[in-house]
Image: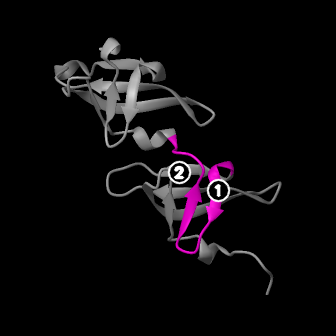
Amino acid sequence: MGNGITTDDILGKQAVDSEGGILGVILKLHVDPVKKIFTGLTVDQGFLKPFLFIGIDLVANFGVDAVFLNVVPPDKYIGMEVLSPDGRIVGKVKSVKSSGNILSEITVSLSGAGLKKETATIGASRILEIGARVVLKESSW
């Protein structure tokens, strides 16, 4: 037996972001067939949420019970409610755009838009904070 970890040590474990948030359970490992190197993993985020691909460069540590990431993947924000500074629900995050692993903007499906499916694009500089929800800055809405 060689040293190191096996797929059994990774599959079924939780993926935890740099803020301690549980992203979901690791379902798959990805290997580059030409270079024969491990390139990333797929995380099941739960019922009705899309699978999340995590590149190997985002993995900080393979722990005993979990895989720890060195960032919060921007795709984690998809589906989060977006609030105005006064707490009014503006809509939900439809998609994210990032540069590397740094969030640059979000596209929001606006609440109360009726049948038109209206969206708004909001730059990262217009976001006050992201926690359980995305809260916009006073000057941005």
4 shown above or below 113 = below
Contact check, label 1 and label 2, Cβ < 8 Å: yes
At mark 2, the secondary structure is: loop
**Residue 46 placement: quadrant:** bottom left
Q: Position of residue 66 (x, y in %)?
A: 53, 67
- Per the rendering, the mark at residue 60 is 1
- Per the rendering, the mark at residue 93 is none
Quarter of the C terminus within the rendering: top left
**Front in this rendered view, residue 141 or 114:** 141
**Residue 33 placement: quadrant:** bottom right
Q: Position of residue 11 (x, y in %)?
A: 55, 70
Residue, disc 2: 18
At mark 1, the secondary structure is: strand
Give me the residue at 39% from left, 39% from top: 78
Q: Which residues are magenta?
A: 57-73
User: Is residue 65 one of those drawn in magenta?
Assistant: yes
Task: Say which amino acid is labelled 2.
Answer: Ser
Q: Position of residue 56 (x, y in %)?
A: 67, 53
Residue 37 horizontal side relative to residue 64, left or right: right
Give me the residue at 38% from left, 32% from top: 129
Q: CA distance from mark 1 to mark 2?
A: 9 Å
Residue 16 horizontal side relative to residue 115, left or right: right
User: Is residue 71 one of those drawn in magenta?
Assistant: yes
**Front in this rendered view, residue 49 or 133:** 133
Within 10 Å of disc 2 (Cα), the crowding (few <14, some 14-19, many 20+) is some
Task: Say which amino acid is labelled 1.
Answer: Ala
| Residue lying furthest right | 35
| Residue lying furthest top | 139
N-term-proximal mark, 1 vs 2: 2
**Residue 92 placement: quadrant:** top left
